[in-house]
């Protein structure tokens, strides 16, 4: 394993976040005023079938209509959206003359809406938008209303999309991808069942951990992580006992908002590079895939960032801790929440580990942001460690 490159300052800090950011129970009532302030009156509400069936999107349209804003619902967003979904949504935007996009839903909905908003004005192929800073011109204004805590798309300047041919995860990024406004209302997370709540929130926890040890970590992201991790660690066990606990939902939403801001400005790391192929090829939910891979990868990361990993470990136990404790503390916390899935539970065999490592090397930006250089062989070793951990756990 190669030694880590120097972790030197990279110059002036650049902080990206939505121009307007609302947080709190009932924040959704501010939506008509937000649209009016932006001079927008014909949004397309991009959402999924679940939220449409619950009637949430229709109630939103009614409330906007009472304020003189004409909104239409597009309920066809899918989990892990691909380029075809984004192009279909962009066509709906162009055909009906909408002046903005309102993303109502989880991370997949927000990612889809971001790309559709861009493609509604962009005439080139979608592949020209792939890359962390590839987007050079604005699309339609996007307002994000997340119904999950942890995804992070509501405050980030990128979206993740599945490109079908060749099959891969693609990042669409740049300052024009940021929502112009975001409203984070913890009450809306009650629309999500516990298991999905858990997957999204664990993704938020890992965003915070990776941002704290990242090469691009900075004073702002560090401060957000220190606010995020204790809140997430406090809220999730309470919600496991009672998913309707509104105070815990608020605490979780605030913690995940902080972790999302940290990730948006320091980026994620190799846990995501390892998790993407599990999601792409085996259908493992994104947050769960990251949870499966986190302890094994952190065992490597902690060697490069011992002081920071020790500080993170301390959040889990409420006392000074050693960096070496972090992987097992993360694993125990996740197991205590009921996240006991392993690679084999998703029909991933030992024979798959080598090609999964090859797939993971495609995610260069997050690998480069990890404070230790990881070759394809190193990534295979991490997958194998996760595999062996699953076998040892099954034998107990």
Image: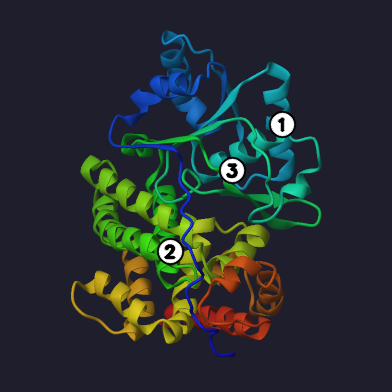
Q: Badges 1 and 2: C-beta atoms under 8 Å apart?
A: no
Per the image, the residue denoted by label 1 is 121
Q: Residue at x 48, y 83 (%)?
A: 300
Per the image, the residue denoted by label 3 is 177
How many tags in the picture?
Answer: 3
Of 148 and 131, nearer the camera is 131
Of 274 and 65, nearer the camera is 65
- Asked whether residue 188 appears in the rendered view, the answer is yes
Q: Secondary structure at mark 3?
A: helix
Q: Position of residue 329 (x, y in %)?
A: 32, 75
Q: Along the horizontal axis of the image, is 25 left or right of 213?
A: left
Q: Residues within 10 Å of mark 2 (few under 14, many from 20)?
A: many
Q: Position of residue 99 (x, y in %)?
A: 61, 21
Q: Mark 2 vs mark 3: give the one in front.
A: 3
**For residue 169, what is the image quadrant?**
bottom right
**For residue 365, what is the image quadrant?**
bottom right
Per the image, the residue denoted by label 2 is 206
Q: Along the horizontal axis of the image, is 241 left or right of 83?
A: left
Q: Secondary structure at mark 1?
A: loop
Q: Residue at x 37, y 47 (%)?
A: 194
Q: Is residue 389 above or below residue 101?
A: below
Q: CA distance from mark 1 to mark 2?
A: 34 Å
Of 261 and 147, nearer the camera is 261
Q: Is residue 183 above or below residue 206?
A: above
Q: Earlier in the sequence, mark 1 or mark 3?
A: 1
- Asked whether residue 340 appears in the rendered view, the answer is no
């Amino acid at each position: 394993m190669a030694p880590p490159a120097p972790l030197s300052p990279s110059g002036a800090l650049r902080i990206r976040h939505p121009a307007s950011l609302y947080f709190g129970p009932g924040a959704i009532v501010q939506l008509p005023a937000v649209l009016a302030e932006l001079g927008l009156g014909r949004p397309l509400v991009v959402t999924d079938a679940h939220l449409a069936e619950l009637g949430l999107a229709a109630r939103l349209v009614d409330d906007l209509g009472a304020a003189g804003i004409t909104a239409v619902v597009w309920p066809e967003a899918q989990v892990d959206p691909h380029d075809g979904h984004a192009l279909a949504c962009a066509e709906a935007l162009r055909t009906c003359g909408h002046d903005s996009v309102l993303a109502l839903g989880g991370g997949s909905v927000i990612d889809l809406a971001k790309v559709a908003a861009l493609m509604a004005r962009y005439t080139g192929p979608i592949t020209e938008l792939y890359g962390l800073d590839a987007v050079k011109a604005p699309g339609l204004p996007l307002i994000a209303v997340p119904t999950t805590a942890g995804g992070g798309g509501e405050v980030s300047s990128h979206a993740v999309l599945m490109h079908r041919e060749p099959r891969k995860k693609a990042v669409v990024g740049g300052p024009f991808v940021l929502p112009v406004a975001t409203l984070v209302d913890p009450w809306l997370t009650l629309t999500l069942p516990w298991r999905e709540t858990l997957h999204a929130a664990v993704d938020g926890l890992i965003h915070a951990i990776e941002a704290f040890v990242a090469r691009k970590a900075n004073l702002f992201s560090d401060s957000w992580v220190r606010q995020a991790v204790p809140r997430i660690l406090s809220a999730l066990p309470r919600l496991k006992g009672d998913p309707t606990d509104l105070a815990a939902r608020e605490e979780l939403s605030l913690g995940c908002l902080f972790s999302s801001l940290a990730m948006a400005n320091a980026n994620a790391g190799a846990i995501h590079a390892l998790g993407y192929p599990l999601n792409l090829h085996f259908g493992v939910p994104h947050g769960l895939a990251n949870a499966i891979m986190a302890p094994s990868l952190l065992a490597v990361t902690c060697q490069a960032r011992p002081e920071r990993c020790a500080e993170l470990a301390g959040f889990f136990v409420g006392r000074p801790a050693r960096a070496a404790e972090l992987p097992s503390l993360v694993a125990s916390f996740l197991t205590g929440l009921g996240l006991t899935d392993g690679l084999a539970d998703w029909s991933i065999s030992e024979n798959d580990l080598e090609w999964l490592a090859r797939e993971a090397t495609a995610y260069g930006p997050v690998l480069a942001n990890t404070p230790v250089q990881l070759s394809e062989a190193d990534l295979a070793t991490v997958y194998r460690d996760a595999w062996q951990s699953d076998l040892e756990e099954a034998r107990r």
